């Protein structure tokens, strides 16, 4: 509530303009409301800038916890610096606030585009992230002292009441900005245009307050300078909006190469497909393709390469199909249909349930000619039922007892989920998650988990194995040599945009002796130690042999890390 005007204590000395009542074109009460309205708008814009930095940094570099910590801590520190620097501008509070808002609109509006440019053409955006966090923090921190001076010049009030009014408008504006970013700006405009529009709103609000409400406090030179600078910033932001789409295409070509042919922002992640347009490209299973291999990127991380995916999916699926019945299969993740392709090669399979979070991925698996050809149109098979849901939440809703109205337990559960080192995926590798999975697993059923790279990140891999054992399952860890280490990117890891796009190459040979290779790591688990190998009715495999599987099992047995604690929801143990 706005308090009535009160007498100010005598003897207080301040800057001349700060003590002089403002000459407003409207009554003081309305002028005060207009100032608080601008506080509201500026607070909303400021929080959008913060969230945009966190979101874009998480998308580009992964690990949302680290990115949020860096952005917020640096910005809060810089806000304190900005508040101190603003003391020197209180004598010209109107001009100072106008310049601060102009700078904030330009820097905040262009920050997303600049960060993405650094990532696309320079290969990293960490330094730019810290720099933008500092600059934005200083400018946001300078707002409150200047606004406090302006609101006191409209109508004098005790300091406590003025601060309460100012902060109330500020916090409500932050609430609106925080909700507008994920529910309005991001889905409707995207990160680049959303930031530019926010900057334009910021510039208009700050410019209107100074150039109209406080225009009588400005000299002619100051008025024309602020008007010209604001106009220039708005022109630059408008140009950015017009060029946002071409810029994004150019940046995407720099990251993914000229073969990027599909780019979809699904609301959950960015999905990019490159290559794979010619018939037979990356078909696997003994068929030689021509042209560039198909590659699927999710939020900038390479998830599928048709050159080598069949080795990965054969190693993931076929050991789990051995050692017992496999009529009912559950796939957690795997919306690309490639794991399902391998499962359907068994004639005894009666039903496959796929639980995929992103409907955009399953839609591409159906509709994209290259990806549909690669997965043999597996998701269109009548035995396959696709559920769009978070795997953790879906498992919580299942009983697995086989009672009337409840699904029967599954003979095989295949967990084909993003890497555990990605913060958003840690709950899908937690003790609670595997406990839920056990509830829907048949007594003689098997669970297989893609557990990350066992050689380059062994602690992460063995933490997954320890977490699976903590729910009462016996495990068989194993690995398979996959992509050569000089092949840019890797499963679930950011792509090194400084490297040129890869050329098509044959799948790597099975033996690690052929050269330095990365390894895919898996964990097979059951209530009793599972039989490891291939099922009697296993189809002919293109990139996997029993000898390779046994060597992968023995290799992991030699490298076992013991004594690692399990990962839980309240104590995740998968640092990026």
Image (cartoon, rainbow, N blue to C red):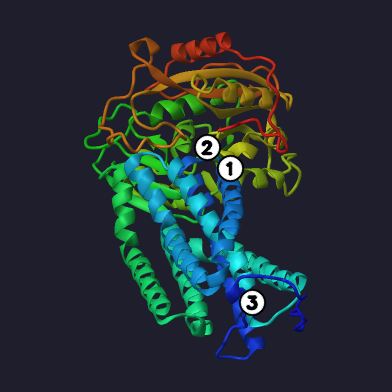
Q: Nearer the viewer, mark 1 or mark 3?
A: 3
Q: Residue furthest left?
A: 290
Check disc 1: other Cα within 10 Å, few if <14, some if 14-19, many if 20+.
some
Q: Nearer the viewer, mark 3 or mark 2?
A: 3
Q: CA distance from mark 1 to mark 2?
A: 9 Å
Q: Is residue 38 left or right of residue 158?
A: left
Sequence-first disc among 1 and 2: 2
> According to the image, label 3 marks what residue?
19
Q: Residue sitting at 44 percent across and 27 percent down?
A: 312
Sequence-first disc among 1 and 3: 3
Measured from the top left, where is residue 90 in percent x and y?
A: 57, 68
The C terminus lies in which quarter of the figure?
top right
SS at badge 3: helix
User: Is there CB contact under 8 Å for labels 1 and 2?
Assistant: yes
User: Is there CB contact under 8 Å for labels 1 and 3?
Assistant: no
Sequence-first disc among 3 and 2: 3
Residue 189 appears in the figure: no
Residue 424 - label? 1
> According to the image, label 2 marks what residue?
418
Q: CA distance from mark 1 to mark 3?
A: 52 Å
SS at badge 1: helix
Measured from the top left, where is residue 351 in percent x and y?
A: 56, 40
Nearest the viewer among 541 and 514 is: 514
Q: Residue sitting at 26 percent across and 31 percent down?
A: 504
Measured from the top left, where is residue 313 in percent x and y?
A: 45, 30
């Amino acid at each position: 509530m706005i308090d009535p005007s009160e007498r100010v204590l005598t003897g207080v000395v301040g800057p001349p303009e700060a003590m002089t009542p403002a000459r407003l074109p409207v009554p003081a009460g309305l002028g005060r409301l207009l100032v608080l309205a601008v506080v509201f708008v500026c607070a909303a814009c400021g929080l959008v800038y913060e969230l945009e930095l966190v979101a874009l940094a998480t998308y580009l570099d992964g690990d949302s916890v680290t990115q949020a910590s860096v952005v917020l801590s640096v910005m809060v520190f810089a806000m304190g610096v900005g508040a101190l620097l603003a003391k020197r501008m209180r004598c010209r509070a109107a001009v100072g606030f106008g310049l601060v808002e102009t700078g904030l609109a330009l820097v905040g509006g262009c920050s997303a585009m600049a960060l993405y440019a650094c990532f696309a053409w320079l290969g990293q955006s960490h330094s730019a992230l810290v720099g933008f966090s500092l600059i934005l923090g200083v400018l946001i921190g300078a707002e409150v002292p200047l606004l406090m001076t302006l609101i006191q010049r409209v109508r004098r009030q005790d300091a406590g009441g003025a601060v309460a009014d100012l902060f109330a408008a500020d916090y409500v504006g932050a609430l609106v900005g925080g909700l507008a970013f994920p529910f309005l700006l991001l889905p409707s405009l995207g990160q680049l245009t959303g930031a530019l529009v926010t900057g334009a709103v910021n510039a208009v609000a700050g410019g209107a307050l100074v150039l109209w409400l406080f225009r009588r406090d400005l000299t002619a030179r100051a008025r024309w300078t602020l008007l010209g600078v604001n106009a220039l910033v708005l022109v630059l932001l408008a140009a950015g909006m017009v060029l946002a789409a071409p810029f994004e295409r150019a940046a995407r070509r720099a990251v993914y190469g000229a073969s990027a042919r599909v780019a979809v922002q699904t609301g959950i992640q960015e999905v990019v497909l490159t290559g794979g347009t010619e018939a037979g490209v990356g078909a696997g299973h003994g068929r030689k393709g021509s042209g560039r291999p198909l590659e699927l990127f999710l939020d900038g991380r390479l998830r599928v390469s048709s050159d080598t995916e069949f080795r990965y999916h054969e190693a993931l699926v076929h050991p789990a199909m051995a050692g017992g019945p496999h009529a009912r299969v559950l796939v957690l993740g795997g919306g690309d249909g490639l794991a399902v392709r391998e499962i359907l090669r068994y004639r005894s399979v009666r039903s496959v349930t796929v639980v995929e979070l992103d409907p955009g991925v399953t839609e591409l698996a159906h509709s994209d000619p290259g990806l549909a050809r690669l997965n043999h149109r597996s998701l269109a098979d009548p035995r396959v039922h696709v559920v769009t849901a978070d795997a953790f939440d879906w498992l919580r809703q299942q009983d697995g007892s086989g009672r009337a109205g409840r699904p029967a337990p599954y003979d095989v559960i295949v967990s084909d989920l993003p890497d555990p080192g990605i913060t958003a995926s840690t709950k899908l590798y937690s003790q609670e998650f595997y406990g839920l999975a056990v509830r829907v697993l048949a007594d003689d059923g098997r669970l297989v988990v893609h557990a990350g790279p066992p050689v380059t990140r062994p602690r992460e891999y063995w933490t997954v194995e320890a977490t699976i054992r903590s729910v009462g399952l016996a495990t068989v860890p194993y690995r398979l040599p996959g992509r050569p280490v000089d092949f840019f990117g890797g499963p679930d890891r950011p792509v090194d945009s400084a490297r040129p796009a890869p050329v098509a190459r044959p799948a790597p040979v099975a033996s690690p002796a052929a050269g330095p290779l990365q390894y895919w790591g898996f964990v097979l688990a059951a209530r009793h130690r599972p039989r490891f190998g291939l099922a009697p009715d296993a189809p002919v495999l293109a990139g996997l042999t029993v000898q390779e599987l046994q060597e992968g099992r023995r290799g992991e047995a030699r490298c076992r890390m013991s004594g690692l604690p399990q990962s839980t929801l309240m104590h995740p143990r998968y640092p990026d």
